[in-house]
Image (spheres, rainbow, N blue to C red):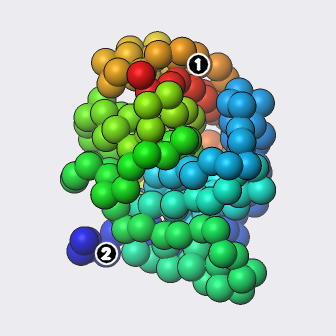
Amino acid sequence: MTTSPNRFDQQAAEWDNNPGRLATAKNIADAMLKAVPFSRAWRALDCGAGTGLLTLNLLPHVAEICATDSSRGMLEQLQKKILAAKIQNVSTLLWDAEAEPCPQTGFALVCSSMVLHHLRDVPAALQRLAQAARPGGWLALADLETEDGSFHPDPAGVQHHGFAPADLARWLADAGCHDIATRTAYTITKPDATGRDHHYPLFLATARRT
Ligand SMILES: C[S@@+](CC[C@H](N)C(=O)[O-])C[C@H]1O[C@@H](n2cnc3c(N)ncnc32)[C@H](O)[C@@H]1O
């Protein structure tokens, strides 16, 4: 697959320098570990894995993770970490979740964090994510709850100002999932453009592919 450089390619080298991103990934991983009965035998897929912040938090709890992203630059940062730490059980895959079905399937867990708001057609992407799971496999998807548009100072590439969790639940049902649940998993607090602290709750939606 070939993609043209995007904003994530440009931000990739500096991505992990923001401590808020590290905290978000850790807290979302903890929420997933609480909500889903993880197994060390599982193959997992992390969609929009970026530099692997969620991937590497979940890795001790599964057998292997396929980290996918549409940004070559983000995946290159993750590959550097894999090489530096001699990690054997993370693979990377350049995959645009908006463009085509995932070339790999049969995953026991399909997860993502802070990716859905970058996708134009989320119901269609959820169909692709569900298809990447094995029957009975889990989906665990975290993103912003509906916000006022202040979360991203630069709106480039932002398709949605968060979501109503009930919409996610409905789209997951439409994608052929059951055991659907949503909860607020973590709240990001950061100053908005006026300098005042603003709270941005993140939901975690979990479901199983039928
Ligand atoms: C906000 S970052 C989150 C990265 C990572 N999940 C984390 O929590 O640190 C969003 C990621 O989604 C990826 N992304 C955006 N659109 C995508 C698409 N259509 N298919 C796959 N990945 C996409 C971006 O390249 C970026 O790495």
Q: CA distance from mark 2 to mark 1?
A: 34 Å
Left or right, residue 195 beside residue 125: right
Q: Secondary structure at mark 2?
A: loop
Residue 88 higher or lower than 139, as above or below:
below
Q: Which residue is drawn at the image coordinates 42% and 62% (left, top)?
A: 69
Please indicate, yes or no, whether residue 69 appears anywhere in the rendered image: yes
- Which residue was labeled with disc 2? 5
Q: Amino acid at mark 1?
A: Thr
Q: For the point 51% across and 61% down, which residue is it?
A: 67
Q: Is residue 120 left or right of residue 106?
A: left
Category of crowding for the residue at label 2, using alpha-carbon neighbours closer than 10 angstroms: few (below 14), some (14–19), many (at least 20): few
Residue plotted at (44% across, 31% down): 135
Q: Is residue 157 left or right of residue 100?
A: right
Which residue is label 1 attached to?
182
The N terminus - image quarter? bottom left
Which of the two labelled residues, at mark 2 and mark 1, occupies the earlier sequence position? 2
Query: Does the rendering let one see residue 116?
Result: no
* Amino acid type at mark 2: Pro
Q: Is the residue marked by circle 1 packed among few (<14), some (14-19), or many (20+) residues within 10 Å? A: some
Asked where in the image residue 36 lies, by quadrant, the reply is: top right
Of badges 2 and 1, the one in the foreground is 1
Question: In the depicted view, which residue is nearer to us: 120 or 68?
Answer: 68
